[in-house]
Image (cartoon, rainbow, N blue to C red):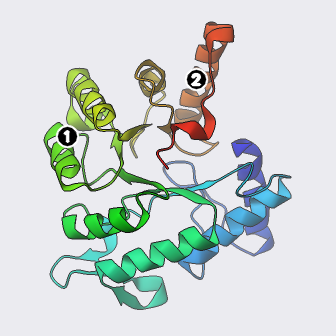
Amino acid sequence: MGAEVFHHLKKVLKEKGYNTAVGDEGGFAPDLKSNEEALQVIMEAIEKAGYRPGEDIYLALDPASSEFYDAGKKVYRLASEGRELTAEKMVDYYAGLVDGYPIVSIEDGMAEDDWEGWKLMTERLGNRIQLVGDDLFVTNTERLRKGIELGVANSVLIKVNQIGTLTETLECVETAHRAGYTTVISHRSGETEDTTIADIAVAVNAGQIKTGSASRSDRIAKYNQLLRIEEMLGDTAIFAGSSVLRA
């Protein structure tokens, strides 16, 4: 399904006159007119692939908001839209997107040190969708524990080579699961064809993996490993589907 949508997305972008070169993680990086247009072209690609948005396929966002947060002014700069939003207005913005599109997960919706913003977002959207902390937690158990105590986010992105050791990685996963947080095992921007994260995703029963689009061998290698694991497990392999999401 994902591969079909990926190829239809390329067609949609070409029809609209956009560049279809892929970036480091294998995804398209066209110069769109607005942030929301990204969602619109993906929705169109899903439908052209013969699937139903909100029934067959859902959306997950990674705004990487630390990249456009002004810590001095405590505002989020949406440069393409010429707007500066407070944390509260940023949450309103996300809520509007969640209302309008089949979004089930938002990663790094607030900046890594905007704990108050994270609290606002969790209170507003935490019961509706998965809120993943990547830059917020950096696979660090101490930061995760702080987040749990403050009641921010409800999921953590797990990057093995970010924290440095497999032991620390597993400790972070266990801490998250004990607190009722979901976990998403993730690649990094600079990747190789090593498939360890696919094995870890299955081993810790994460149910979710983030490893790029359906292009570039360093990304495809992980998906192929998951297929091999499924074949090896046979009838004991269970696809959890949307049940892995918190909301």
- At x 21%, y 30%, the residue is 164
Amino acid type at image mark 1: Asn
Front residue (pair 172, 28) = 172
Q: Can residue 183 be seen in this view?
A: yes
Farthest bottom residue in view: 82
**Relative height, residue 202 to residue 89 (above, below):** above
Q: In this view, does 131 lie to the left or right of 70?
A: right
Q: Residue 228 sits in which quadrant?
A: top right
**x, y percent for residue 211:** 50, 40
**Relative height, residue 217 to residue 82 (above, below):** above
- At x 56%, y 64%, the residue is 29
**Relative height, residue 229 to residue 22 (above, below):** above
Q: In this view, does 24 lie to the left or right of 123?
A: right
Q: In which quarter of the image is the N terminus?
A: top right
- Disc nearer the start of the sequence (1/2): 1
Task: Provide the secondary structure element on which disc 2 rests.
Answer: helix
- At x 18%, y 37%, the residue is 141
Please give the residue where the numbered disc 1 appears in the rendered image: 140
**Proximity of marks 1 and 2: CB atoms separated by less than 8 Å:** no
Q: Is residue 44 left or right of residue 73?
A: right
Front residue (pair 206, 82) = 206
**x, y percent for residue 116:** 21, 69
Give the CA distance from mark 1 to mark 2: 26 Å
Specify few, some or many for label 2: CA neighbours under 10 Å numbering under 14, 14-19, or 20 or more: some
Amino acid type at image mark 2: Leu
Please give the residue where the numbered disc 2 appears in the rendered image: 226
Task: Provide the secondary structure element on which disc 1 rests.
Answer: loop
